Amino acid sequence: MSRFAADSTGIGDLPLSRLLVNKDANYPWLILVPRRKDASEIIDLPEPERAQLMSEIALVASALKQLTRCDKLNIAALGNVVPQLHVHIVARRKGDAAWPGPVWGAVPRPAPMNPRSSIASPGRSRASSAFRTPASLPMGTAGSPAVEFSLKIEYSSL
């Protein structure tokens, strides 16, 4: 089983990237994985795909920030454990399990995610939210169709 499959669940696709949600329910945590197995760094992508990835990061990060009303977003492409290029987008709150440090290794074992939830946020009561943002994400060609990104997240208390 791949590390992505063990630690996350696929929730959708954007023009360049697969969108995953991390199973660690301590933080609202999304991961973008460009469908380019030979890329391990952002600079490995050709310029049009780099621009596409940046657009996808902005789209997903904006949706996550609006949805969670977080204090800070952490966006990182580390790749020390999983070399395939991927970008973590983590919504952070002052006082979360790792604040103000990094989320990696802050909590010994990830809190289990409620099977009915896509993302859980500690301290929130159970509620359902939907967020839809139309955005143009060009694939490097003129006239590319707009992509509608839709994310429905159900919070659960831990």
Image (spheres, rainbow, N blue to C red):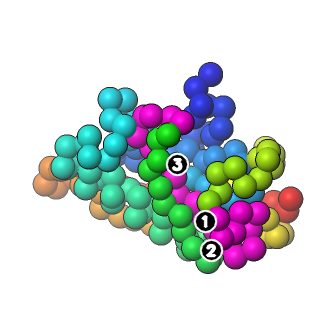
> Which residue in the protein does label 3 denote?
31
Residue located farthest toward the left when viewing the structure as drawn: 142
In the picture of the structure, the residue carrying the numbered disc 1 is 91
Three-letter residue code for mark 3: Ile
Residue type at tag 2: Cys
Q: Is residue 38 left or right of residue 69?
A: left
Residue segment shown in magenta: 81-101
Q: Magenta stretch mostly in which secondary structure?
A: loop
How packed is label 1: few (under 14 Cα within 10 Å), some, or many (20 or more)?
many
Q: Earlier in the sequence, mark 1 or mark 2?
A: 2
Q: Residue at x 37, y 29 (%)?
A: 37
Mark 1 residue element: strand
Q: What element does badge 3 sit on?
A: strand
Task: Name the outermost residue toward the top.
Answer: 1
Q: Residue at x 64, y 47 (%)?
A: 22
Q: Nearer the viewer, residue 47 or 55?
A: 47
Mark 2, residue position: 70
Q: Is residue 84 visible?
A: yes
Mark nearer the N terminus (1 vs 3): 3
Residue 39 relative to residue 60: left or right: left
Q: Is residue 90 magenta?
A: yes
Q: Position of residue 4 (x, y in %)?
A: 57, 34
Image position, residue 42 (x, y; %): 32, 47
- On the question of residue 152 being in view, the answer is no
Is the Cβ of the residue at disc 1 closer than 8 Å to that at disc 2?
yes
| Relative vertical location of residue 82 with respect to residue 147 in this rendering, above or below | above
Task: Point out the image quarter for the C terminus.
Answer: bottom right
Residue 17 drawn at (x, y percent):
40, 43
Residue drawn at (69%, 69%) of the image: 99
